[in-house]
Image (cartoon, rainbow, N blue to C red):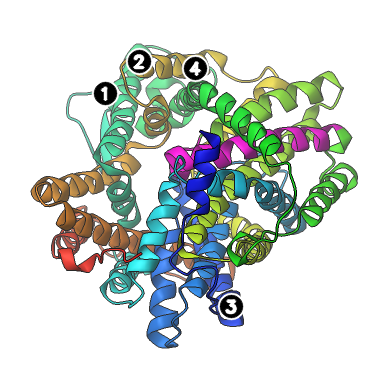
Amino acid sequence: MEHNEKTKSSSFVPYIPASQSLPELTVTAIVLGIILAIVFAAANAYLGLKIGLTVSASIPAAVISLAILRGLFKRKSILENNIVQTMTTAGEAIAAGAIFTLPALYMWNLIPSLAKVSFIVLVGGFLGVAMMVPLRRLLIVNEHENLPYPEGTACAEVLISGETGGKSAEMVVYGFIVGGLVKALGDGAMWFKTEIETKVLHFRNALIGMDTYPALLGVGYIIGLRISGQMLAGGLFAWLVLIPAISFFGAGNTAAVFPSTTPIPKLDAWGVWESYIRYIGAGAVAAGGIITLVKTLPMLYSSLAATLRSLQGNRGPKVALDRTHRDIPAIWVFLMIALLIVIIAFAPITEVGIIGAIAIAIFGFLFVTVASRIVGLVGSSSSPVSGMTIATLLIVTFIFKLTGLTGSMGMVAALTVGAIVCVALAVAGDISQDLKTGYLVGGTPWKQQVAMMIGVLVSGLSIGFILSVLHQTYGLGSQQLPAPKAVLMKLIVEGIMSESLPWELIFIGACSAIVFEFLGLNSLTVAVGIYLPVHVSTPIMVGGIVRWFVEAVTRNNESLLKARVETGTLLASGLIAGESLLGVIIAILIWLNVRLPERILFTGNALPFLIFIIVTLLLAWGSMRAKSDDIRKLNR
């Protein structure tokens, strides 16, 4: 069977065959890739801090690259476009790994220097690339028939079918303009408020609301009705069940109930959410992450075993490799990994010591191997990165405590190890998808690997500044940027190192997640809905409804359905990128002491609600006007 798989993969001919060479790792591609990597790192950092999710940058980056390189510069190398999207995904991955962990340091008031943030994400990112390189031939080539790598395959389709540019790029630009304009007029010029809410009559502290952000609408469209619906279910459970229940049972209390310092009768809905629901939500998210990891244990084991078997099977005489099979030489890869582990062990900037470095080497190799294979089956968005990071944090924090490294130094060291591993996992998952794209279109692997490292470098050097500005402007962990995944990591480390957490609330959340799982729901998705304000889940649900409507109306025409969904996805990606990037720009302006309006011009709910409805209709209209011809068939 193994021999047959190798025969099939070796007979595969990519879009650009090995015998043909086109411009690839060019100065133009590198410069454009650097710009887009920083842009998508900033956008995903803002979005991830707000809702705990990031969105794939590969397809929007591929479309933008096609529009610029082919449309403006008249360059006709698909391999250049592949390099650009590879570098761009590095920015997305670096942002994801950083915002899932490092904001905990800011919440502890242990503000890291820009150098420390850059060091952590850079060593994590480089480890993720280096540890994935030896796996490329095993997972991408030998398992070509068995591991589809959905995002990588979809990106290859976009690159091949969209070489002539056209309407696809326009949809991203339109979405970018609309999302950026709404953000600029709302949170920048303060013409209208961007959060609306209403109380439920005769229902104590029951509240329903919505953040009227185009980015959240776009997220809902991309993830679909089922996931957005489960997320909203969590929000409604918190705001229409838990908050009223706590308010009702605590109505007669004159003393504060831990962890709040204010009696419950004096707390409004937001006060109850801040004092109690966030801990319940954090417990639910932690349990959901662990459940997700446990559910994938069979896949984890089989992935690791299959990879080790492939490594053994690859021993034999070396043969000359053509262009499409050349990786960075193994000796350089292993030297890089060894050097990075030694630097981590002895660099005073991290203070994780030899124990921390060994943990990073072990968990890094184990989970990078697993993550690189899992994303081939279920995609990057479904990879249990947070679950694997939680497992790393739990074990490492216990080890540090047993060895006497406690207090703030122990917490920072444990979080640093978790952050490096988390970044490595995110980067490894993304470069796996990129290398699949390259395999399909005929890219040169070592050039993609170098491009990914350049993307990691520029994103890693900029992410510290982005986090610092966002913290000084909005506050990481605040209502504006709740940073749900980072709060979870913070609670895990605190819980092991100290006894100051409201464990009853955390266990209530954990048990709720188990109940959701038995009900057939995705416990992690519902848990995120509990943790975040319902105001975030509501517009995401609206985006899911738009996606459902488009699919329902077009379900009898497969080619038209594909065209409309992909067009809507590009428009939604533009909404997300435009608003998120404007959010970062507004933060930078405030950080630079640029005077912006402080009072809202129109204080009512009608105007922001009307604007949100208009953007929703634009998303539906943009999706529905796509035609079958907009998605070209692949000519292989």
Report the Cα–Cα distance between label 3 and label 1: 56 Å
The disc at residue 504 is none
In the picture, which quadrant includes the C terminus?
bottom left
Circles 3 and 4, Cβ within 8 Å, touching? The answer is no
Q: Which residue is mark 1?
A: 204
Report the Cα–Cα distance between label 2 and label 3: 61 Å
Rendered location of residue 534, percent (x, y):
32, 37
Residue 347 appears left or right of 102: right
Rendered location of residue 618, percent (x, y):
18, 63
Rendered location of residue 458, percent (x, y):
65, 66
Q: Which residue is mark 4?
A: 505
Closer-to-camera residue (104/186): 104
Question: Mark 4: which amino acid?
Answer: Leu
Residue 206 shows in this picture: yes
Secondary element at image label 2: loop
Mark closest to the chain's N terminus, 3 or 4: 3
Secondary element at image label 1: loop
Q: Which residues are magenta?
A: 355-383
The question of residue 329 being in magenta is answered with no
Q: Which residue is mark 2?
A: 251
Q: Which residue is mark 3?
A: 31
Question: Mark 3: which amino acid?
Answer: Val
Circles 2 and 1, Cβ within 8 Å, touching? The answer is yes
